[in-house]
Amino acid sequence: MAGLRLGPLLRYVDWDTGGSATIWVEADRPTTAEVRCADGAGGSARTFQIAGHHYALVPVTGLTPGSTTTYEVVLDGVRVWPQPDSGFPPSTISTPAVAGRGRPGPGPGLRVTFGSCRQAAPPAGRRGPHGADALDTLAARLAADPAAERPDLLLLLGDQVYADQLSRPTRQWLAARRDLREAPGAQVADYEEYTQLYYESWLDPEIRWLLSTVPSLQIFDDHDVCDDWNTSAAWLAQMRATPWWRERILSALMSYWVHQHLGNLSPADLEADPLYEAVRQTPDGTEALRAFAAAADADPSTVRWSYRRDFGRTRLLMVDTRAARVLAEDGRAMLDPAEQQWVRDNAMEGHGGYDHLLIGSSLPWLMPPLIHDAEVWNATLCRGERGPRWARIAEDLRRRADLEHWAAFPASFEALSDLIEQVGTGPRAPATVCVLSGDVHHAYVAEPRIPTTSRVYQLTCSPVHNSIHTAVKLGFRLGWSRTGRWLGRGLSRHGRTGRPPLSWRRTGGPWFGNQLMTLALEGRTARLRLDQAHKERWPRAGEPTLVTVLDRELTAADPG
């Protein structure tokens, strides 16, 4: 009898018709996976095989718009979800009450909860180094209180797994498998080891239930592959010279495609995907997926990891800021030309037909001014503007200090800024343009000083479950200060970089801790909430709670 090894994960929910969804599962052997909903909707799919693992993405059809239905997962006719001893409520699929089709008005509102950087939480009853897990805590709140407001969408903005920073149990599992004295040591080396990371993270009972009942969209950042992934051409050349890198990058892209990327796609996109067709039509899709990953690594322009979703009158552009980079120092860009054009085309298509534009970028667009100036200065020196000696120093500093955000790609920063200003200007501009980011292990709100009709925000939220050194905290605080701005101008003079093409100010934060932001979008209004997981305020030992530290209407009059 087939068993459920991982999942279910509720991924795509159709906001055009409100009638379909997809459910991702991993079984322990070849099987037919079936989803049966209490309202009669459902679907089934045969598993496909990758590296000895068996996956299915089940299309669920016949859902009723504007409804919530419970569901169960059946493998070869036997129910495997919900688990018989589960203490959680039944998993559900909720669909929007779609505008049109006889329904007046602009359509339903949207609640998006987002964050990044989640190290797997330790098992129940054990304390880890990073404190209470914000996503675990959210799940516990929702499970305990059926009346609690649920997100319509979880937006996971990178570092869903850490291939290079492993927990003690995972290191012990690796040590039983191979000699950790040989490179890459206590890091993930191949596809099988990547699957262990997903088991550790997604079999967490709270996370497993949460992902089964709240739709999620995901994108990678560096730790899903390796710290500082694609930070520079010199970095990439050094990694490719190691004997273990090729297997690492291929396994990273393969496991990301299976566990995260597939669920981002609509059923129509899946049906049109030749790779998805190939892996389903062969007894073992490993070689087809491996060839795809090898091509994507050799030429990133052959694949697009970015994607677009429209939720009523809210548009989301989830942008790949890692794999699509141009790393040559004389043409350095966050996005290759085709990717940059894709972002522009999808932002401008139907301009005036949406009320909110969300740009999901794992890396922040607007950083503390000192850090922004340092990254521009560093990019100039790495390009050789001050000679080869400074270039060598700057390359070393770039890696040590993680100077690789949008500012480290000055032309790309300017192009994104120009696009946001263009989208946000004029009588048909959306109410808000928000760049949603993570990566930097703290949270803040920043606003550019540009003459737009739209309210424009950088909303940064990180980590979900991780920590930050005290010295780094102090550095971020300095980065926003007047002293930091003065130091940044000094770097700009040394690098002869000139002033940034726009200025901005911090209007919230910085906040440090494990946290999640939630955007509530209704009509042309937007409200932002930041919740932190606090162990010191637990009602009882072992029960963290979420504490709201910010609740602000973004579309209200500018407070100045």
Image (cartoon, rainbow, N blue to C red):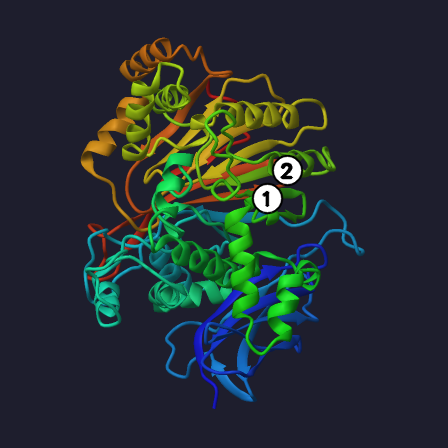
Residue 480 pos. (x, y %):
33, 22
Identified at 39% across, 41% down, the residue is: 237
The secondary element bearing badge 1 is classed as helix
Look at mark 1 in the image and give the residue it sits on: 301
- The total of numbered circles placed on residues is 2
Tell me the distance, in whole angstroms, between the alpha carbons under discs 1 and 2: 8 Å
Q: Which mark is residue 335?
A: none
Q: Residue furthest bottom?
A: 1
Q: Is residue 144 visible in this depiction of the protein? A: no
Lateral position of residue 86 relative to residue 41, left or right = left
Can residue 186 be seen in this snapshot?
Answer: yes
* Image x and y of residue 167, in percent: 24, 59
Q: Earlier in the sequence, mark 1 or mark 2?
A: 1
Mark 1 and mark 2 in contact? Answer it, CB < 8 Å.
yes
What residue sits right under mark 2 in the picture? 338
- The amino acid pointed to by label 2 is Ala
Picture coordinates of residue 11, whole percent (x, y):
55, 61
